[in-house]
Amino acid sequence: MLRQHLHWRRLIGSTVQIRQHGQLIRTGTVDDAMADSTALWIAGDATQPRTMYEAAPRIEVWAHPEEAED
């Protein structure tokens, strides 16, 4: 089961969902993240370029609990 993650740096290399206002807007692999979790980058793929998402109201990052490194 997916859960929301607040510590984005722990998700580098993980497959995540980016949700805005509760709606799925992107699924992809976290390529990099700021140490303070203010932004992360989803790696580009065949259909979408590498994209940065900033921490903002209503932007959420969801992943399986085992995806986050401790």
Image (cartoon, grey):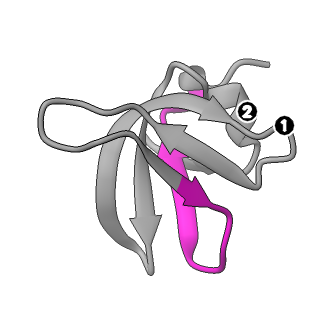
In percent of width and height, residue 6 lies at: 73, 51
Magenta stretch in the rendered image: 53-65
Q: Is residue 43 magenta?
A: no
From the viewer's perspective, is 10 left or right of 54? Answer: right
Question: Mark 1 = which residue?
Answer: 35
Label 2: state its secondary structure: helix
* Image point (61%, 44%), residue name: 40
* Image point (63%, 61%), residue name: 54
Question: Mark 2 = which residue?
Answer: 9
Q: Residues within 10 Å of mark 2 (few under 14, many from 20)?
A: many
Disc tally is 2
First of labels 1, 2 by sequence position: 2
* Image point (38%, 39%), residue name: 50
Give the Cα distance between marks 1 and 2. 6 Å
Dividing the image into 4 quarters, which one contains the C terminus?
A: top right
In percent of width and height, residue 48 lies at: 22, 44
| Mark number, residue 62 | none
* Image point (53%, 41%), residue name: 41
Label 1: state its secondary structure: loop
Residue farthest to the front? 49
Quarter location, residue 45: top left
Question: Marks 1 and 2: CB-CB under 8 Å?
Answer: yes
* Rendered position, 45 above or below 6: above
Q: Nearer the viewer, residue 25 or 69?
A: 25
In percent of width and height, residue 19 lies at: 42, 64
From the viewer's perspective, is 69 left or right of 59? Answer: right
* Rendered position, 50 above or below 45: below
